[in-house]
Each structure stands twice: as C-alpha cells, then as structure tokens.
Image (tube, rainbow, N blue to C red):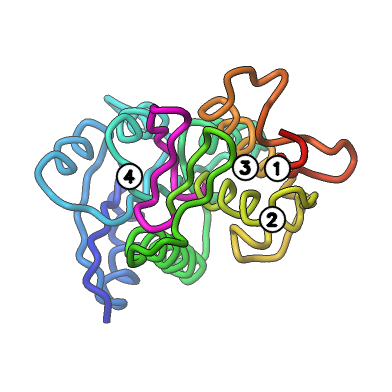
Amino acid sequence: MSREAILLVDDEKEIIELIEIYLKNEGYIIFKAFNGVEALEILRHNPVDLIILDVMMPQMDGIQACMKIREKNNTPIIMLSAKSQDMDKISGLSIGADDYVTKPFNPLELVARVKSQLRRYKMLNNRSDSGDDEIVIDDLVINTATHTVTVGDQEVKLTPREFDILKLLAVNQGIVLSMDKIYEEVWNEPFMDSKNTVMVHIRKLREKIEKDTQHPAYIKTVWGIGYKMRSAKEM
C-alpha cells in the first residue's frame, strides 16, 4: 500500500469525498482544500506528492492556483473540470498541469492516472547518480538523475510531463517522432485525437528552453510528421 500524500482541491464536497474514498482504499494520505487559497496554504506546511485540482472554484480558481504552484514546485497536477472543450484542456495544460480529467469521470480511471503520474515522477527523481545521467546537446544539459535541465548557466523549471517529452526527444536525437508516438510513450496510453495536448506541451517546452521560439534551435518541427531533437550533425 502506498503512503504518498495527495491534495484534493474542489469546492464540491461530494466530489472530494468520492475521490477520497477511492484514494484512501489505495493507501494514500489525503489533504483537502475547497479553493485555491486553502490549497496554497496546505502546500506551505505539508509535503504533497500529487495535486488533484478543480478548475472552477471561488476565491482562487484552479488555473490561478496551478500558476502559483508552478512558481515554486513541480509536483504533478491533475486538473478536473466540467468543461470538455479542447480550448479548456489546452488552457489547463499550457499553464503547467500534467493531466486533465473531465467531469463526470470514472473514479477508477482517476486512480489509474494518479498512479501513473506518481510512478513517473518517482522514476524521474529517484534515479541513482551515474556518469550516464547527463544528456548534453550544445548548451542544453538534461540530467535524468536529478530531473534538472539547464540552458547555458540557467536552470529551467519543467513539469514532469515536459521533462518526459524533452528526455524522449533527446535520447532519440535526430530521429523524427510522430505526435502519436510521443503521446503513447509519455502518457502511457493509446493516442486518441490528442494532437493538441502534445502541441501545447511542445510549445511550453520551447518557451522555456529556446531563445527564439519562432526559429527553435533544439526542438525541430518536421511538418506533417512530428518533432525531433536537433542532432550533433545539425549543430
């Protein structure tokens, strides 16, 4: 049984109680907040391994809370919303969320997504140090043991999902990866009309590691196919 701590943030008490039942059955420690302000206060005083964050809430909504959280840490965030429009999903993902679940949802599916996010996050942060942990591409350095990325002498803060995508592209340097391949490798689930999800994450990655997003030096677009990391031959 797991003892990771999960913060549930939703102004609907019934939703929180439902999720709490399923997660406690899996052994998780649960913190509860009913708006973004309460969530930030809990995070200031308690270690949390994952956050489930509703979008529509009073005082401070999920989008604002997510942005505030991302200023200080990379804890995995799964956003909940009654909205199912693509633009609503893009909004959540573009400000740092790692996954997006639309209400009404199957609690067992949510639990599966929680486990997937925690498993990925632990793998990225608990690897032992070795000489093979750094991937260096010009002045971009990706350390898979410490889950850190630097460009020049500046450390870049990435979400776990962004780090996964960057690492995938880097270890396949020079190889074009389709959007469905990226999605299936990083999200670990079948690709189903998820192009916007991949595109949003690539855009956010470029904003963080590229000096000129209009003419990216690292992540190249191969029109009609997908993306690739610039190879040493192209430097």
Q: Do callouts 3 and 4 mark residues in contact (Cβ within 8 Å)?
A: no
Secondary structure beneath label 2: loop
The numbered dot on residue 172 is 2
**Residue 136, above or below 146:** above
Mark 2 or mark 4: which comes first in sequence? 4
Q: Distance between the Cα atoms at labels 3 and 4?
A: 17 Å
Residue 100 appears in the rendering: no
* Residue corresponding to mark 1: 232
Task: Give the residue displayed 60% in from the left and 58% down from the top.
Answer: 186
What SS does tag 4 mark?
loop
Q: Which residues are magenta?
A: 144-161
Nearest to N terminus: mark 1 or mark 3:
3
Using the rendered image of the protein, determine whether residue 85 is visible from the camera's viewpoint. yes
Going 52% across and 33% down the picture, which residue do you hit? 139
Between disc 4 and disc 1, the foreground one is 1
> Disc 4 versus disc 1: distance between alpha carbons?
47 Å
Compared with residue 181, is residue 23 higher up or lower down, i.e. above or below? below
